[in-house]
Structures are given as C-alpha cells and as structure tokens.
Image (spheres, rainbow, N blue to C red):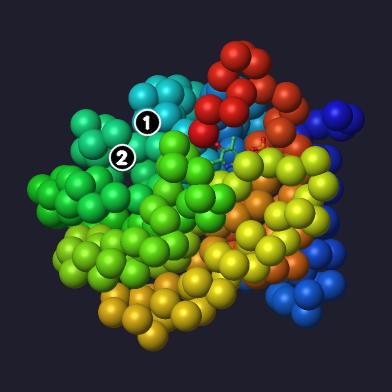
Amino acid sequence: MTGGIRERLADVRARIAAAAFRAGRDPAEVTLIAVSKRVPAERIREAVDAGQRVFGENYVKEAVAKMRALAAGGALPRDLRWHLIGRLQRNKARDAVRHFDSVETVDRPDLAAELERRAAGQGRAVEVLLQVNLSREPQKAGVSEEALPELLARCAALPHLRVVGLMTLPEPAADPERLRPVFARLRALRDSLRSAPGGGNLRELSMGMSADFEVAVEEGATRVRVGTALFGPRPGPAEEGRP
Ligand SMILES: *Cc1c(COP(=O)(O)O)cnc(C)c1O
C-alpha cells in the first residue's frame, strides 16, 4: 500500500471510472463508500479533508463514538453521509436510525418493524437497502432470494422506511471474476422486482469491495464498499471475516 489517503482515493476513483466506461456507464452513477470500520477518527478526518463524503461502518457503537470524535475535532462538511453496512441487532435500531443516513443490511421483518417504530418515534424516514444472501449459506446474513419479494412488500408498506435498493456481501473469491455472476444476479433481482409490490423505488445496488469492486461496477453497482484499498489493512485479524 503506497501513498497517502489522497492518492489512494484518486486511484480507487479512477478505477471505478475506468470500470464504468468499460461497461458504457456514467461513473457519476457509482458512489464510493469508504469503509472505515476499525479506522480511527483521525484517519477518517484525513479522508474527509481529501474530499471523501460517504463512509460505511459495521458497528453502531463504534461508529457513533467516531462520529462524536470527528464532530468534536472541528466543523464537518454538511454533505457527509454514514451508511450502516454491518449486521444490525434490533436493540441498536434506535441509534442506527438516529445516526445513519442509510441502513444497507435489512434482512428480516422483525428488524424492519423495529426500524419503522424507531423512525416513526424520531419523526423521520430511514433509507434502507435489503441485504440478499446469494450464496445460500444458511448461517450468513441476508434474506434468501425466495423470501426477498415478501420482505420487500412488507418493508414498502412501512411508512417510515424507504426501500431504495439491494445489497449483497458474497464470500470473497481469489479470482474476482468468480463473483461476476453473483453481481449480475443481484442486478437481475433488482430489475425484476421493480415491477413487484413495493419495488417501484429500487435503484441502488450496493456490491463490490476492495478485491472486486471493478467487476461489481461493470455489473451495475451503484455503490461500492471499499475499505482496505483506501485505508490499508485493518488491525485485529481475529475479527477479519466478521461482517
Ligand atoms: C469490511 C467490509 C467491506 C470492505 O471490505 P474491504 O475488503 O476492506 O474493502 C465492505 N462491505 C462490508 C459489509 C464489510 O463488512
């Protein structure tokens, strides 16, 4: 990993743009989410100073602590955005609604109902993505393809939830090309669900990480979640693999 955060941001952005052009897409359609889990607030500040505006965090508690540290360290741009990309427990739903602009990991009706309750209580709407488990591993987070239409319809009926897209987190593959069919599948699901009950606002596809975001962009990603390629390897190898 060479260069500072500014150089790495420029490099990742250039690679996103090149992948978009290869697929005949407008790079402006792709939002780069800088995944800052276990990255300290000072380094997030560097990324903000380098122009990055959208950050992804996995744990509500960790994220809120860093948001506070950042705010205490000086004025922040008003267009800063936080996306929750880790598994959300119901008892964290209130803080998630309060502090995040998008919850990308809604995968079950009870969680959706709790987000609805908390959003209504705070008098605001929360943007959500439905996380889909395309690898059919039962222990993994995400709704199955089969259960997705019903979850979508139920979420769409909740007045304080705005369901705008789908997210997936496949097992990493040594060869990113192996994930191309997975990414293509998520796009096909979004496209077909647009005409299903509650699917009218589906547009976002959150897919692709450091090792495979270019393939994801070629397959239609509108959000890529990139951590290591921006911030370097994360401390705490015991936690690697934890979503
Ligand atoms: C950690 C994480 C990422 C980023 O992974 P990198 O390989 O470091 O880019 C993306 N999405 C989710 C859900 C993650 O937990």
Q: Residues within 10 Å of mark 2 (few under 14, many from 20)?
A: many
Percent position of residue 101, x then y: 38, 50
- Residue linked to disc 1: 60
Percent position of residue 203, x then y: 48, 73
Check the image and report above or below for 38 versus 156. above
Element type at mark 1: helix
Residue 50 falls in image quadrant: top right
Residue at 68%, 41% (x, y): give it: 172
Q: Residues within 10 Å of mark 1 (few under 14, many from 20)?
A: many
Give whichever of 80, 211 is nearer the camera: 211
> Callout 1, which amino acid?
Val
**For the N terminus, which image quadrant?**
top right
Mark 1 or mark 2: whose residue is earlier in sequence: 1
Check the image and report above or below for 90 versus 214. above
* Residue 53 visible within the image: no
In the rendered structure, the answer to whether residue 55 lies left or right of residue 158 reads right
- Residue linked to disc 2: 96
* Alpha carbon separation for disc pair 1 and 2: 6 Å
Residue 157 falls in image quadrant: bottom left
Residue 87 falls in image quadrant: top left
> Callout 2, which amino acid?
Ala
In the rendered structure, the answer to whether residue 102 lies left or right of residue 53 reads left
Ligand 1 sits in quadrant: top right
* Residue 176 visible within the image: yes
